[in-house]
Amino acid sequence: MPRAKRLSPLLPGRLLAALAGLVLPLAFAPFGQYWVAPLALCMLFATWNVPPGEAARRGFLFGTGAFAAGTWWLYVSVRLVGGTPLPVAVLLLVGLVALMAAWYAACGYLASRWSTASLAFDACVLIPGLWVLAEWLRGWIFSGFPWLSIGYAMVDGRLAAWAPLGGVHGATLATAILAGAVLVLFRGRTVDRAVASVVLLALTLATWILGGQAWTTPAGAPLRVSLVQGAVPQLLKWEPSEQLATMEHYFEATAALRNQDLIVWPEAAVPAPDDWVGNYLEGLRGLASELHAQLLVGILTHDLERDEYHNSLLALGEEAGVYHKRHLVPFGEFFPVPAFVRSWMRMANLPFDDITAGSRQQRPLLAAGVPLAPTICYEDAYGAEQLAFLPEARLLVNVSNDAWFGDTIAPHQHLQIARMRALETGRYMVRSTNTGITAIIDQRGRVQALAPQFEPWVLSGLAQPYEGATPYVRMGNYPVVLFGLLGLAAALLIRRRDGN
């Protein structure tokens, strides 16, 4: 009984934190209840008025709930599609959830450890700053996993106006400030509530002003684009008996098109390396010339001189070129081990994927003279990946294969991420996938055309090139990171002044 009494005061806070995490995925696609995001943050922040260790536990419970409920589809990818043994699949999922939850544990610990006497400062500056730093760090450390970053949920909300200014993390920061200010209105002293009211008023006014800005302008005539969705099941995609049928399907679907400027196939649409299908590629070059179109083909390319394979997007037509994927998937496309270990695995004839990352210095591809910023698969989950092509590039192109995730919420989340990339750069994005979700997205992140999932389809429409640069294109994540660091510095100075 004494133990039960000692634990009972902590239980409601822990349950509230876990509940906040469990409901957070409702804010993201396909559910689209973006208002849940600030609500969930407000619930979590309300539980952090405890000692640092307990705040860390509550942050961990929040992260565990959020990623267990929001990324369960990883099990489908590694177990049901990838064929990974059950214990390994479970271990990978549990490990990833725990790793992601650790970021919010650290956030909670520091929010409590560095708290000041001012609830308004803590809730509107310190905690939002810590939060955005945690999301920024988890987006690139250990290759990064930026899924479920709060800003993505806001792509359909008013706070999406902050994305062209600070990228997805700018929208995240605005959401966290909103959540903190609302918390202060309910819990703070009179002076804190007054400060929070000013913060809310300023946030509302700034959001309204930003929402009316047109950061980029149309450049030239729209491109006529066709996106070919093959709908090849992942379990059949690399079967030798299916390869010819797959290639014939894509060829015939493309040959039927007319009067197109740009035709895009999905990631690895050709289920064989380029040096195995030389004659087929020559036929595609002839077809592109006949159609007077630029054809972008997802394919593995083999660098014979270095004996390296790349996950590539091959441009066939009058403006030939190639893009090699730069941000690879750990354990999916490469093993994160030193080169000599990979050499040993190769000599030992052990099965592993060994794709080589492309150079960080690559030129935009071209279509009808329009520079294109290409990304392959989940590269579009990293906003900074495409900044190297901007502002020169006038159109974003993404090719993906979300067949790995089956009929889960993952393809919908991935489309939402792509919409954020269009919004924060002020560019149209054309997105060609194997099984969906293939789409044409405008410069404000709105879907203009959509293909049905899991059906062979050719999605045709217009994509308007845009020129100019949003503040995010010019400055990247630096302003948001600076806000977080300055917030931490201010908290430490305030604590030192107050003798803490």
Image: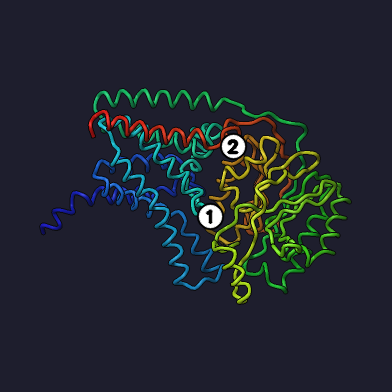
**Label 2, label 1: how far apart the Cα atoms are:** 20 Å
Q: Is tag 2's residue or tag 1's residue first in the polypeptide sequence?
A: 1
Is 142 or 88 nearer to us in this picture?
142
Give the class, few, some or many, for how many residues have Cα within 10 Å of label 1's Cα (few <14, many ≥20): many
Measured from the top left, where is residue 247 in percent x and y? 76, 64
State left or right for residue 75 relative to residue 450. Answer: left
| Residue 340 coordinates in the image, percent (x, y) | 59, 67
Q: Quadrant of residue 228?
A: bottom right
Which of the 4 quarters of the picture holds residue 36?
Answer: top left
Q: Is residue 238 above or below residue 176?
A: below
Q: Is residue 238 above or below residue 202?
A: below
Q: Which residue is mark 2?
A: 423
Q: Residue at x 60, y 77 (%)?
A: 348
The amino acid at mark 2 is Leu
Q: How many marks?
A: 2
Please say if 82 is above or below 163. Answer: below
Q: How is the image coloured?
A: rainbow
Q: Residue furthest left?
A: 2
Asked if residue 370 can be seen in this view, the reply is yes
Tag nearer the camera, 2 or 1: 2
Where residue 295 appears, as percent x and y from the top left, is 79, 51
Q: Look at the image and tell me in which quarter the N terminus lies.
A: bottom left
- Check disc 2 and report its element: helix, strand or loop: helix
* Quadrant assignment, res 443: top right
Circle 1 SS class: helix
> In the rendered image, which quarter contains the C terminus?
top left
* Residue at 39% in and 57% down: 98
The residue indicated by pointer 1 is 410
For the view shown, which residue lies furthest in the bottom direction? Answer: 348
Task: Let me know if residue 458 appears in the view.
Answer: no
289 left or right of 409?
A: right
Residue at image point 67% right, 52% down:
399
